[in-house]
Amino acid sequence: MSKKILYVQTSGPDTPERLYSPFVLATTARAMNIEATIYFLAKGILSVKKGEPQKIKMGSFPDLKEVMDQATNAGVEILICAQSAQLWGGRATPEEFEQPSRIVGAATLNDLALEADAVLTF
């Protein structure tokens, strides 16, 4: 049985200092053979809209897109709340977001939280 960590990202581009942690921690989890999922909702979805991660850069870190690509290449799953996308005026289609990501419903978050060994929120 593999351990699972769920990272919930509610912060958006207006707080870039909160955006790197889930990707770095999830990538580290994968290196430790732990399943890692990042679920984006509320303002968090704005940080993974197509073209947005390339605009976010802090300190000596690479831009958020590069950190995101490292995470997904390591096997981190990126999920986007459909209801949050609609709340911010989107259609909740995959074309609106950086890939690989998957649009899911609100019930998915509940299921993931119940199945996870740990849940961290940013």
Image (cartoon, helix red, strand yellow):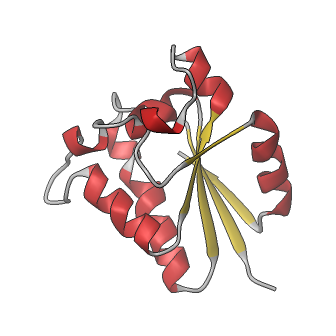
Q: Determine which quarter of the picture holds residue 41.
A: top right
Q: Residue at the spot x=44%, y=32% of the render?
A: 96
Whether residue 50 is situated above or below residue 27 in the rendered picture: above
Depth order, front residue of 101/22: 101
Query: How far from the left and from the top, in percent, is residue 9?
Result: 54, 43
Q: Residue at the spot x=56%, y=21% of the render?
A: 91
Q: Residue at the spot x=55%, y=86% of the render?
A: 32
Query: How far from the left and from the top, in percent, is residue 22?
Result: 48, 56
Q: Is residue 84 left or right of residue 45?
A: right
Depth order, front residue of 116/54: 54
Q: Is residue 48 left or right of residue 83?
A: left
Q: Quadrant of the N terminus?
A: bottom right
Q: Is residue 116 left or right of residue 94?
A: right
Q: Residue at the spot x=78%, y=45% of the render?
A: 108
Camera sees residue 86 = yes
Query: How far from the left and from the top, in percent, is residue 103?
Result: 62, 41
Whether residue 6 is situated above or below residue 58 in the rendered picture: below
Camera sees residue 11 = no
